[in-house]
Amino acid sequence: MHLAHWLRRLWDYNHTEFFTERVLTSFDGFPINVCTSSNPWVARLTHSAKYGCSVVKCDLGISLCGHIVNYTGPHVGVRHDSRMWMDYPARRASMYPWEWALGDKAYVNCPEFICEHKHQPRQPLTPAQLRFNDMLQFYRGRNEHEVAAVKCGRGALHGQWRGSLAGLAAIVRIVVHMVALQSRMTGPRYDCYGPWPVCPTAVAKAYYP
């Protein structure tokens, strides 16, 4: 099963009004509620202070037009979103040097990501920075739509999982790839712009070194 294909981010229509090239994907982590283990060590690894319960997490990547192109997980609940990205060097290596992804403030330490401007003590954000944050949040909202498509209506992912981790991993894999197939069959959910290469400069250098 290989329907959430990483190469779909290179589609000639994977462009938006404000990101016309080079920014190809957007990533976000999401939790899946699980029962608290009787093993104290496992219980500690799955307890998330952010969600106030035991969870495992997955990292979901989509193209800017809304197609699922990558996912990893389940990870232990205490793992930070940036760790879920940095711990997969093969995925990072598969990105081009000119390529960028969108992420929230949790990805600020990942060199491949464009994130929101953070408020600094005694240094308020400028109007231009606030507008950029609003624009980035608008596009990152598409991750929330795809996470809802994966989780909602499925008791195994939206409720509390009581089975094995291997069983949950299999269900997540099936659901993610089936949602990816559904989005490919119905077409992009959002406005697309193109066709033109995702990085015309890189394409030109490839043909005219």
Image (tube, helix red, strand yellow):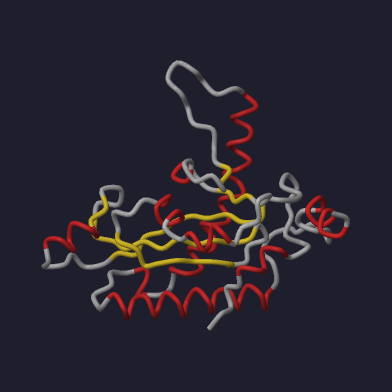
Residue most toward the right?
A: 208
Q: Looking at the picture, does residue 100 appear above or below residue 7?
A: above
Please state which of residues 41 and 121 is positioned toward the viewer in this rendering. 41
Residue shown at the point (63%, 61%) measured from the top left: 63
Could you say which quadrant of the image residue 24 lies in?
bottom right
Please state which of residues 193 and 95 is positioned toward the viewer in this rendering. 95
Residue shown at the point (60%, 22%) measured from the top left: 126
Q: Say whether residue 193 is left or right of residue 100.
A: right
Q: Looking at the picture, does residue 131 appear above or below residue 198?
A: above
Q: Say whether residue 30 is left or right of residue 192.
A: left
Please state which of residues 26 and 143 is positioned toward the viewer in this rendering. 26
Q: Where does the image place residue 100, in percent across and percent down from the top left? A: 63, 49
Q: Looking at the picture, does residue 104 appear above or below residue 60?
A: above
Q: Where does the image place residue 37, in percent across and percent down from the top left? A: 16, 67
Residue most toward the top?
A: 122
Residue shown at the point (46%, 80%) measured from the top left: 174
Q: Where does the image place residue 28, in percent across and percent down from the top left? A: 48, 55
Residue most toward the bottom?
A: 1
Q: Where does the image place residue 95, in percent across and percent down from the top left? A: 61, 58
